[in-house]
Image (cartoon, helix red, strand yellow):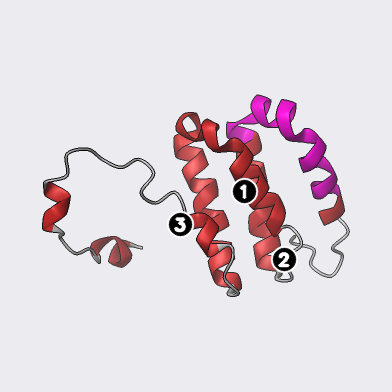
Amino acid sequence: MMKMLLDIEDDPGWHSADSEDENANESTLPAYLVVPEWQKHHAALIALAQIVKVCSKAMIKNLEQMVTMVLNTFPNPHPRVRWAAINAIGQLSIDMGLDLQVQYHQRVLPTLAASMDDFQNPRV
């Protein structure tokens, strides 16, 4: 983990930026969810769960997009991706509980219930 954090190049343009672009990396997670590699799907879902855990107040404006991204990964053929999707919904439930329940329970609950039928992968 530390090696990855230390692998950073200094960009002279970064120092002179007048304002920080809040949406600069907004499309990174969705981009990881449309590629074929299951590892990138897994990484995007784990990252999303961690971001929500730390930045839930800032991320509330993106709740619909996050719920849609996560729910769309539930039918993924790889069990680790499905596990990461359940984990992400769990984190959304913890940190955005009332908003998630009121606005999206009709989408989340049936998807979670359907995931319980995965008897071949008990961890999921």
Q: Position of residue 94 (x, y in %)?
A: 62, 34
User: What residue is pinned by disc 2?
Assistant: 76
Task: Determine the CA span between mark 3 and mark 2.
Answer: 19 Å
User: What residue is pinned by disc 1?
Assistant: 88
Q: Residue at x 45, y 32 (%)?
A: 58
Q: Position of residue 72 (x, y in %)?
A: 70, 55
Specify the principal SS of the magenta part. Answer: helix
What amino acid is at disc 1? Ala
- Whether residue 72 is in magenta: the answer is no
Q: Residue at x 26, y 40 (%)?
A: 20
**Between 69 and 7, which is closer to the camera in this rendering?**
69
What amino acid is at disc 2? Asn
112, above or below 75, in the image: above
Task: Determine the CA span between mark 1 and mark 3.
Answer: 16 Å
Pointer 1 or 3: first along the chain: 3
Element assignment for label 3: helix
Whether tag 1 and tag 2 are in contact, CB under 8 A, the answer is: no
| Occupied quadrant, residue 28 | bottom left
Q: Position of residue 61 (x, y in %)?
A: 53, 32
